[in-house]
Amino acid sequence: NYLDSISGEEVYNFLGLKKFTFKEVKELELNLGLDLRGGMNVTLEVAVDDLIRALSHYNTDSTFNAALQQARVMQRGSQEDFVTLFGRAFEEIDPNARLASIFLTLDLRDKININTTNAEVLNVIRTETDAAINNAFNIIRTRIDRFGVAQPNIQQLQTKGRILVELPGVKDQKRVRSLLQGTAMLEFWETYENQEVYTYLLQANDRLREMQASEKKAETTEPEEALTEEQEKAEEQVAEQDTVSEQESSLLAELEAAGDTTQAGLDDLENFRKEFPLFAVLNPSTDQQGQLFPGPAIGIAHSKDTAKVNEYLNREQIKSIFPRDMMFRWTAKSTDQAGNYYRLIALKANTRDGRAPLDGDVITDARQDFDQFGSNPEVSMTMNSEGAKTWQRLTKENIGKSIAIVLDGYVRSFPTVQNEISGGRSSITGLETIEEAKDLANILKSGKMPAPARIIQEEIVGPSLGQEAIKSGLYSFILAFILVLAYMFFFYSRHAGFAADVALLTNMFFVIGILASLGATLTLPGIAGIVLTIGMAVDANVLIFERVQDELYAGKGIKLAISDGYKNAYSAIIDGQVTTLLTGIILYIFGSGPIKGFATTLIIGILTSLFTAIFITRIIFSWWLQRNKKIKFSNPKTANILRNTTINFLRKRKIAYVISGSLILISLGSIALRGFNYGIDFKGGRTYVVRLDQDVQVADVQSALEVSFETAPEVKTFGANNQIRITTTYKIEDSGEEVDNEVNELLIKGLQDAGMLDENVSFEDFTDKYLLSSQKVGPTISADIRRESVIAITFALL
């Protein structure tokens, strides 16, 4: 485009000393934070626990797995790395257990032997995890670079295993989450045919029915106390709620669609659930005549029922029915446009170690392409020589059967092999958009993540809110700047006031210039820091000018008064600025995100204001004195303000003690009785700022969302009457893209039930038109913020 064509042209000449091209100017421009221009801010945490499990080849040792679980709990209140916590937990659970027996695998046999001590094994694990985290960082950087975002910010944080990703201007949240959290675990599996599995499903259904009947019989044989009339009513209410919850299942939805919502229809459904508990949530893959469909898809289930199907099939009594080499995976894509129904695929794990016969390590290239008809996007893959041989053997042995292509635990496609395929070429089909195909090719080409990366903190700012933030921040800055300039000019006359204003202008120039030269990012809290700097910058001048006035009132000449005024004001200026500087340094060290942005501008502003307030004004006064210019430090209206005012503070100290002591006691009592109302930064949760088309009744929205989120969220108006801030802790302990999508869907449904959104509003419409910003803080990072806040306050008080 045009801007690219002029990137090498000279556009700025700095005082004839240095010339800058358009490209250089763009590279040196001040970066705006996401809160000012919109975008997505994500903190990822590499799952070190999953990495340790992988290093052990998923060892089932009870002590090992209990130590991992205990280390996860310990991590929330500790700043130590996960490997250290795991080693400590392992030692506490069984002091005599040896890690060498768990990690003596083929991959680590050169580093660990049977005589390796636990401490040495932990060092090996720490080395492997550090390398994996660095590898994950490089993979994420590669993915983002290929994603095509302008000026992304990707950096490893001080806390091991955490990666900060800032993507300005990004709107498609789902796409970014998939891109960042996908492990690119690509596998090729042989499959079972539907006809081979159906008999096992029948047996599993029969056993499940027997198990449920036995459980119900055991419950009814337990002694029961006589129920009061109130208890009977309570049970009837619970039964009614259970009936309502059952209406959310897929089968009842089908009955409703068919118009059968009578009591007889509900009774038939309940009888069907009792007789066919498995098939009530997993519809067998058959046609209307009951004939089995060919292929590896053994059934279809509603998205709300997939967890129940997994729970049934993972029961030990049910797993024993199926062949040991049979596994089940859900398809990544739904069978319907609404995204409600997914197929269950039967895989065959017939290798010695139970792994896929072919995985993504053999992929040398992946690119977005189109199918043979040229209309549907797909991903074409090329394999290395070893992979090509294995792929040729697999296709030869499975002609007429399906091979499932599984990515990150979900079946992307399961094409039927028509003939033997040589040359190591394959493709993933069933992709809906070109962007999805490009992202998938990007993930595969970037390489497999050594461990999953979970989003533990997320903040999304819409472009409209970003523009509003720029406007409000700019207005506050300009207003504060003008008021301070006018005050200094009026109060200290046009001479001293003018010198202070020049120093303030110079100070702002220095602050902005240093931020740009350091490559720092200006955020909304950063603007607050600059506004605070404006006041602190003239504070030094106020001290100097008042000292000069004192010297003038003592009868000294203007030259000596200025010299002594500066000299006598130094100690007060240094004391005040240094204490604030120390606070800023503490905020920078222990703060994160917006706090660090505020601290950065505050520290820079303090240092530059010391220079401008002391040296710039002194240079101006010296220049005027050399030219015998008349200098005034007050005007007739302000000369005697507070000049003769005397307040005996020591005489009133007892009153001050009583007032201060009372306020302290009231504050302590309030803390003891009411406690703190923690925000999501300190307790974890999700916050959404939504702008709707009409004014909002907070109570109605809260009631509707309480049904969706099971507990009442916090709903408050935010600015205008049609803007609300919604805060919830629903499923904040859980992680994963599925959980995030579920919470977003429940939010939209709750707003629709409250009559705030049209029933046809999709997730994409909601994020584009109504969602101004959202924030997610996981429990791990909220615990870190609480701990660092306590440390910061303690150091600041000291």
Image (tube, rainbow, N blue to C red):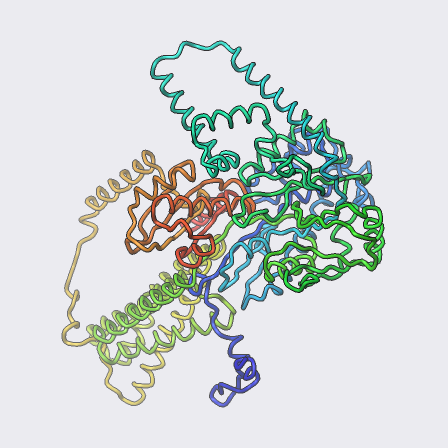
What residue is at 72 percent from the left and 43 percent from the top? Answer: 295
What residue is at 17 percent from the left and 65 percent from the top? Answer: 642
Q: Is residue 304 above or below residue 755?
A: above
Q: Is residue 6 above or below residue 160?
A: below
Q: Is residue 214 above or below residue 530?
A: above
- Report x, y in % for residue 57: 74, 40
- Report x, y in % for residue 573: 35, 65
Quarter of the image with the N terminus in it: bottom right
- Report x, y in % for residue 578: 40, 61
Give the camera-side residue of 539 and 600. 600
What residue is at 27 percent from the left and 39 percent from the top? Answer: 666
Can you name the residue that lies furthest to the front here? 289
Give the camera-side residue of 100 and 399. 399
Give the camera-side residue of 365 and 430. 430
Task: Say which quarter of the image contains residue 89.
Answer: top right
Task: Say which quarter of the image contains residue 559.
Answer: bottom left
> Is any atom of residue 569 visible in this view?
no
> Is any atom of residue 702 visible in this view?
yes
- Report x, y in % for residue 794: 43, 47
Residue 2 is left or right of residue 796, and the answer is: right
